[in-house]
Image (spheres, rainbow, N blue to C red):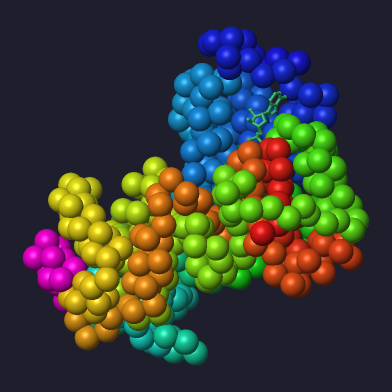
Amino acid sequence: MTMKSPDTPSDRIRLTPEQVLAVGNAQRCLYIEAAPGSGKTTVSAQRFGLHRFTHTADHRAVVAVSFTRSATEEIRNRVLRYWGPSALAWPHRVATLDALLCDVLAHLLQIGALQWPGGHRELEVLDTWRSRLPTASRKLKPVLALNGTRIIAVSVQQSRAGSHPAPDDFLAAVDKGQCTHDNVREVLQLALQQPRTRASVASYLGSTIRSLIIDEIYDANDLDLRLIHLAVDTGIDLTLVGDPWQALYGFRGARPEQVSQLITHHRFARRDLHTSFRWSTSTQQTLAQRLRHGESTTLPIGRVQDADVVLARQWRTLWNTDTHVLPLAIKPLTGQFQGAACTLLLNEMTERSLGIQAVFLNDALITLGITNRDVLEQLRPHLHHTLEALAGTDSVRSIWRDFVNVLITELPVKSLITHDRVPLSGLQSLRAKSQVRHDRLVPGLTCHQAKGREWDAVGVRLEESDVAALHTGLVLQVEEHRSLYVALTRARHLTIAL
Ligand SMILES: Nc1ncnc2c1ncn2[C@@H]1O[C@H](COP(=O)(O)OP(=O)(O)OP(=O)(O)O)[C@@H](O)[C@H]1O
């Protein structure tokens, strides 16, 4: 079935019967469980349009949310492609869940249900303090808390040191109406425990949204799930889309087991998308089916040169594997500045040899105070020169010293730059890769970074425990097994063990 006459023939998508049943399902609360490549994004975007263009007398919004900017952008693009720009006429929107949380907090401030220091009702919400305030490794973490309905800044002692701003700087920024997305979450987490504020949030959601579609629901944490429970109670149409086999963010607070409870508790109707558009060989299709059914499997052994990408659980494993693998992130333990400087060098190498960016480039740019990409362009000849030196035989200490001198001259953030700590292991790792012919390098990624992506041939660096797990069959409840599942379902043609 073609859902809508699109603008160009190439936009025409003929939905499969199972996709049609998911898109058009009339239940108020619907859970769509989707295997890799089975059209999760396609179905979310189609259902968005269907809800958007029916019940148009109801002026409340149809909203689709996902957890990352890239996933959100993908849904937005699909909605535009299938349904045209009017699908996203205000108030209908595709946004990150964080953006929805900001809307909720802004509303609570507007109606006076909560009070921000200095009386601010509009906030500037940052991704990280590092882009605005100096941060240092410390155990004291400044956070926001509630005193009744007043928002206050406090400091909490953490068991491990993290990169945080100084409490006084934090307080001054909050007084100016600035905060981070984490701070928004801190406030809402506490606010939703207060019955009156919770009622205000429920009333806001129920009066402004008529249909909420949540992609990658298994990435939801406690606060997200609280909000979703509230949304169900207000009578909003709710569509949850996800795959429990691809739930990887337990370490960031995701609660996949609570998602299952929510679905059962509110008696969500369920539709499954089984048919994957990813597999172009029966080998890959069979592998995916066996993994999902917990059946015993083995992988063919292959060479790095046969793969388009190499996946492993840890960046460290990728750096310690075959020299032809070029991991897309480097994390020396020597310090924030050293990590950011090594990331710039790695990025120069990945862009030149593979045409792709290093994974944490943006974080590195923020740490180094580089807000303008022109500065990175100016640094390029120096980065190139440093990599050439690394490919030679000069000592890494003297190469580092020269490189730091360049950064001191070129960069705005000088306070972070310390000469005393040389990221020896990071530079030696880069040296090893700079000595390999560029056209022989294959990108290396962690399973987390590979989620949502696909390649023709994927090499997976298995650990002993992975081989054992594949032999006995994967178990859904074990996060390591799920990350193995994600790695082994990225290939269109072939997955090989390395
Ligand atoms: N009915 C269909 N007919 C043809 N192609 C389709 C159909 N449904 C989805 N596809 C294509 O299959 C690919 C995967 O679809 P989509 O990105 O929606 O899946 P997904 O489940 O979100 O993937 P992932 O598991 O990677 O998150 C896309 O290229 C999409 O255009």
Q: Nearer the viewer, residue 429 or 107?
A: 429
Reply yes or no: does residue 412 show up in magenta.
Answer: yes
Q: Is residue 55 magenta?
A: no
Count the marks: how many? Answer: 0
Q: Is residue 45 above or below residue 112?
A: above
- At a point 42% along the width and 85% down the height, the residue shown is 161
Tell me which residue sits at (27%, 71%) in the image. Answer: 393
Q: Main secondary structure of the magenta part?
A: helix
Name the residue located 47 percent from the left edge and 57 percent from the top edge.
Answer: 326
Q: Is residue 404 above or below residue 293?
A: below
- Which percent across, then down, holds residue 278? 70, 35
Q: Quadrant of residue 40?
A: top right
- Give the image location of residue 143, x and y in percent: 41, 76
Which portion, as a residue range, is magenta? 402-416
- Residue under the point 86% across and 56% down: 297
Image quadrant in which the N terminus is located = top right
Q: Quarter of the image containing the C terminus?
A: bottom right
The quadrant in which residue 53 appears is top right
